[in-house]
Amino acid sequence: MHGAGEAAARRLLWNDHGWRVALSRQIEFAGKSGALYRYTPLEEDRFVPPAGANYVIAELTPEGPSVVYAGETDNLASQAWRAALEEARKTYSDARVLTRLNVTRAVREAERADLVEQYHPPMNQGPPN
């Protein structure tokens, strides 16, 4: 992971309480612009709000999150992220979804582009969808 959130993400991910506590915490990702974005791990079997959101699929490692894919959706409840997560888990078995609610499409698209430019997620490097 790059950026100011690296040390904080490590503390959040690997503490004495284990994954259950870690997954309830926010993780910061720094975009190429220097902007910080706080994401919350998604509990896949829980209610998901019908709201616009950005999402990151990442492997959570002792070194910090490793971004595999950055996406956005106008309705998180539609679970458009699920297909990308299933694809990611074919190569990255410990991949998790982290979300950040954003109402406007322009904000979501700009944030997604900022994160892709910073992390170069492997699943964002193929042909456009």
Image: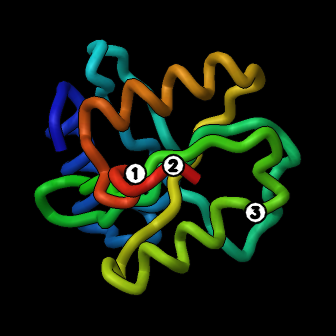
| Residue nearest the observer in this picture, 59 or 85 | 85
Q: Earlier in the sequence, mark 1 or mark 3?
A: 3
**Residue 44 location in percent, x, y?**
66, 71
Q: Earlier in the sequence, mark 2 or mark 3?
A: 3
User: From the viewer's perspective, is residue 48 above or below residue 49?
Assistant: below
Q: Left or right: 119 with respect to 108?
A: left
Mark 2–mark 3 contact, CB under 8 Å? no
Secondary structure beneath label 1: helix
Q: Quadrant of residue 84?
A: bottom right
User: From the viewer's perspective, is residue 119 above or below residue 11?
Assistant: above
Name the kind of residue labelled 1 in the image.
Asn
**Residue 20 location in percent, x, y?**
46, 70
Q: Left or right: 75 with respect to 16?
A: right
Image quadrant where one finds the N terminus: top left
Q: Identify the residue position indicated by label 2 in the image.
A: 128
Question: For the residue carrying disc 3, how many other residues have a C-alpha within 10 Å: few (<14), some (14-19), or many (20+)?
Answer: few
Name the kind of residue labelled 3 in the image.
Gln
Mark 1–mark 2 contact, CB under 8 Å? no
| Residue at mark 1 to residue at mark 2: CA–CA distance | 8 Å
Q: Identify the residue position indicated by label 1 in the image.
A: 124
| Residue at mark 2 to residue at mark 3: CA–CA distance | 19 Å
Secondary structure beneath label 3: loop
Q: Identify the residue position indicated by label 3 in the image.
A: 79
Q: Looking at this rendering, what residue extends furthest in the right direction?
A: 50
Q: Residue at x 36, y 37 (%)?
A: 116
